[in-house]
């Protein structure tokens, strides 16, 4: 897929790719949080062929690099749960299962090697492919390459979607596989889409919210027979999920993180405006643009936009009502990152109004993008402090040159998307 076929100038295509890898390139390592534990689970599956991490944690404490080069020799908190007479991993195993074949090959070629670079490249590659495919799909839907570029790349680089593409968390994999499933559905490759939806669900149980949205739109647009084909993938995963649970915990429908209700009001307020987690500060273009689109634009009221907006709202409420709505260590509103990706669809309506009407809509879109990009840029050039739940005020004030430079780069990028992308229909 060449830059010319993408209707992007070659230079702009390269700039977008370089920006995409920036958060990982400046610190090519697993930073922390759940990352080392997912890496350790993948290593155990690849090398030991089991789900028992107790010996792996002991090996890391003795100096092994299975959990990342920075964790070698450390006593890690053990992300394990005791269920009756079993000790099991306290996170979904879909992501470790996906990475295990790569780590098996790595250990075969370079025994003892740390997984940091390999896992980082896996996430970067998958999310970049998903990003480009999403752009092509939206281009075909709108018949306007410039509109698609502003919605997809604008939404991505002005939100935590960008930062999380450097992490070995489930969130970037969840949205990436869902985006690829949407593209396969649009291309009428229903069996491929069914597999991709199953993998989406395997990343984390909340991926079901995106799966339901994709199947719902398919019923609306393509009819129940097409949707039934898509549903076969998630249903097959449900069988696997039940068998895996029977093997590990003795009951078919258990989740490793029990869902416990907290304060919905506190969660809603926190995920909207909290200085560490508020989506309004970390993704202003996606949140405000999607809201304006649903209220004001004709495309914003399309079935696709309504289903996508519903998927985001469901993600938001499920996360807000959970007792740990902050989601542990991470950058910005980590738990709702896959839902943020869904907002790209209604954002298209706002972008369309901005391109057609200009004036207030154009200025608002550009300012929201620049504001969001400046925040993400600060995190991209210094990902370690950003990772540990830094407030947006601290992120912007620690080094004043960073948001200033980020604002300038953001202004240049939105101008390039606005004026340099060819609006011709797709080939």
Image (cartoon, grey):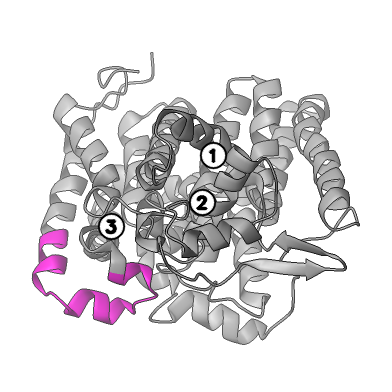
The answer to whether 75 is drawn above or below residue 144 in the figure is: below
Query: Can see residue 302?
Result: no
Side (left or right) of 154 relative to 79: left
* Marking on residue 39: 2
Of pointers 3 and 2, the one earlier in the residue sequence: 2
Residue at label 1? 99
Q: Please give the name of the residue rendered at 18% of the width and 25% of the height, measured from the top-left corner.
A: 10
Circle 1 SS class? helix
Q: How far from the left and from the top, in percent, is residue 318?
A: 67, 68
Residue 398 is a magenta residue: yes
Give the class, few, some or many, for how many residues have Cα within 10 Å of label 2's Cα (few <14, many ≥20): many
Q: Please give the name of the residue rendered at 81% of the width and 40% of the height, measured from the top-left corner.
A: 240
Q: CA gap, disc 1 to disc 3?
A: 33 Å
Tell me whether the residue at label 3 lies in contact with that at label 2, contact meaning CB atoms closer than 8 angstroms: no
Circle 2 SS class? helix
Residue at label 3? 369
Q: How far from the left and from the top, in percent, is residue 56?
A: 58, 56
Give the class, few, some or many, for how many residues have Cα within 10 Å of label 1's Cα (few <14, many ≥20): many
Of pointers 1 and 3, the one earlier in the residue sequence: 1
């Amino acid at each position: 897929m060449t830059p010319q076929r993408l209707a992007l100038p070659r230079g702009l295509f390269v700039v977008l790719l370089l920006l995409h890898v920036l958060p990982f390139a400046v610190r090519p390592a697993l930073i922390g949080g759940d990352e080392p534990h997912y890496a350790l689970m993948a290593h155990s599956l690849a090398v030991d062929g089991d789900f028992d991490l107790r010996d792996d944690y002991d090996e890391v404490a003795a100096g092994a690099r299975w959990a990342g080069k920075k964790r070698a020799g450390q006593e890690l908190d053990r992300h394990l749960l005791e269920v009756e007479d079993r000790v099991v991993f306290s996170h979904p195993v879909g992501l470790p299962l996906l990475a295990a074949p790569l780590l098996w090959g790595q250990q075969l070629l370079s025994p003892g090697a740390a997984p940091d670079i390999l896992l980082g490249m896996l996430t970067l590659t998958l999310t970049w492919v998903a990003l480009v495919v999403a752009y092509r799909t939206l281009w075909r839907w709108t018949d306007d390459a410039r509109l698609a570029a502003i919605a997809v790349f604008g939404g991505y680089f002005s939100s935590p979607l960008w930062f999380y593409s450097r992490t070995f968390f489930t969130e970037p994999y969840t949205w990436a596989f869902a985006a690829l499933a949407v593209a396969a559905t649009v291309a009428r490759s229903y069996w491929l889409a069914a597999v991709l939806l199953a993998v989406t669900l395997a990343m984390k149980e909340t991926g079901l919210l995106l799966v339901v949205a994709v199947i719902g739109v398919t019923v609306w647009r393509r009819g129940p027979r097409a949707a039934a084909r898509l549903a076969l993938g998630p249903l097959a995963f449900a069988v696997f999920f039940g068998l895996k649970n029977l093997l590990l915990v003795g009951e078919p429908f258990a989740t490793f993180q029990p869902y416990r209700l907290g304060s919905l009001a506190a969660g809603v307020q926190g995920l909207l405006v909290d200085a560490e987690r508020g989506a309004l500060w970390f993704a202003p273009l996606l949140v405000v643009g999607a809201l304006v689109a649903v209220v004001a634009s004709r495309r914003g009221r399309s079935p696709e936009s309504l289903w996508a907006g519903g998927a985001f709202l469901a993600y938001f409420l499920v996360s807000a009502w959970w007792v740990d709505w902050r989601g542990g260590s991470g950058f910005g509103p980590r738990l709702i990152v896959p839902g943020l990706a869904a907002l790209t669809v209604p954002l298209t309506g706002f972008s369309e109004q901005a391109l057609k009407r200009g004036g207030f809509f154009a200025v608002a879109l550009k300012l929201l993008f620049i504001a969001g990009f400046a925040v993400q840029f600060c995190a991209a050039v210094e990902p370690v402090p950003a990772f540990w739940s830094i407030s947006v005020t601290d992120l912007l004030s620690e080094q004043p040159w960073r948001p200033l430079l980020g604002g300038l780069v953001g202004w240049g990028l939105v101008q390039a998307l606005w004026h340099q992308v060819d609006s011709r229909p797709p080939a």
